[in-house]
Amino acid sequence: MKNVLISAVAALSITMTGCASNKQIDPTPVKLDKTDSFAMQVLKSGFDYVPFDIDDAEVAEDAYSNKVGYGASTTLGFLANGGVGALGGFGMAAIINAGGDVRKDLMHYIAWVPADNIDINDKAAIDEYIKLNYLKPAADAFIASEHNKNMDHPTEFVSYADGEYRVKGGACWPIMHGKEKYDECQIFWKHDVAPVRYADAASGLPFEPEEKANRYIVVRISDAFYGSSVVLPYLKSNMIYAYVPAFGYKAEHLNRFAPADKPMVSNKIPFIAGKNSEANFFIKLKK
């Protein structure tokens, strides 16, 4: 328990650094390496540098197509249908155990915000845009889902104002440590978003944006307490993704918020979650 508390304090200190940081943003778009997997392109987009070691697993085309059968992008149902075992055959342990930085154990949202009418330094406007357009619709869908309604402690909507999405119920106790917490809580982050840089078509985007703009602000938000994780199966925009770490024993806690045939996290495999329960793995074809 002592180690759990130490990890939580360390994680909190990292996620909160955006509030006090005066680091100057270098807005210059960075060229994406198109030889990286889609998952890696998304992850690298969200950092000046990825602070924990993680590599794409390179696999031969026949194994990539035949053994996995899903490729590097599939749905969360893959995690419940033997997919983790198949991925393990590709040496994914090198990814699972990569790096000692505590940030590898956090969820990191990476979002693209149209920059035509928002300045990269206006964190309040960026925060509001992400929550209203990307996260709130997903949270609303989770609240309305039959799965949530049938849980032992359904999550109920209380209010949304000033960027706070307040609920009561199961989502207030995502990781079941200590005393039960089902009273009212806020499931979105309370600290600053972290604008990383601009991105545009010339520098490369990992995807074809649903929202058209001349350029975009790439933004990272880190969640140390996983309250927002309930939205993962309900993301409806391809403008936001989430780096989902290998959760170990915590996976069982978090997966109670999703149907058994579509677990939203893995205990062993990190991946990038996207729109409509999409899961993107750190796999690419061997040259």
Image: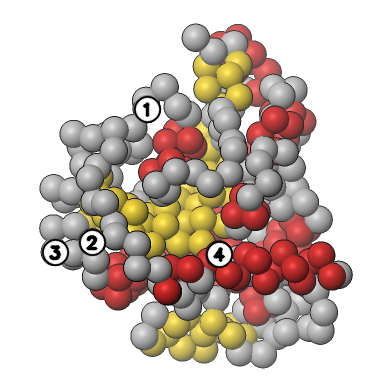
Which label sits in the foreground, 3 or 2?
2
Q: Residues within 10 Å of mark 2 (few under 14, many from 20)?
A: many
- Please give the residue where the numbered disc 4 appears in the rendered image: 14
Circle 3 SS class: loop
Colour pattern of the rendering: secondary structure
Say which amino acid is labelled 4.
Ile
Q: Earlier in the sequence, mark 2 or mark 4?
A: 4
* Residue 170 position in % (x across, y down): 69, 77
Disc 2 and disc 1: Cα gap in Å? 23 Å
Q: Are marks 1 and 4 in contact (CB under 8 Å)?
A: no
Q: Earlier in the sequence, mark 2 or mark 1?
A: 1
* Residue 9 position in % (x across, y down): 67, 71
Say which amino acid is labelled 1.
Asp
Residue 267 shown left or right of residue 13 in the figure: right
Q: Earlier in the sequence, mark 4 or mark 3?
A: 4
| Residue at 42% from the left image edge and 48% from the top image edge | 47
- Please give the residue where the numbered disc 2 appears in the rendered image: 120
Q: Earlier in the sequence, mark 1 or mark 3?
A: 1
Q: Residues within 10 Å of mark 1 (few under 14, many from 20)?
A: some
Disc 1 and disc 4: Cα gap in Å? 27 Å
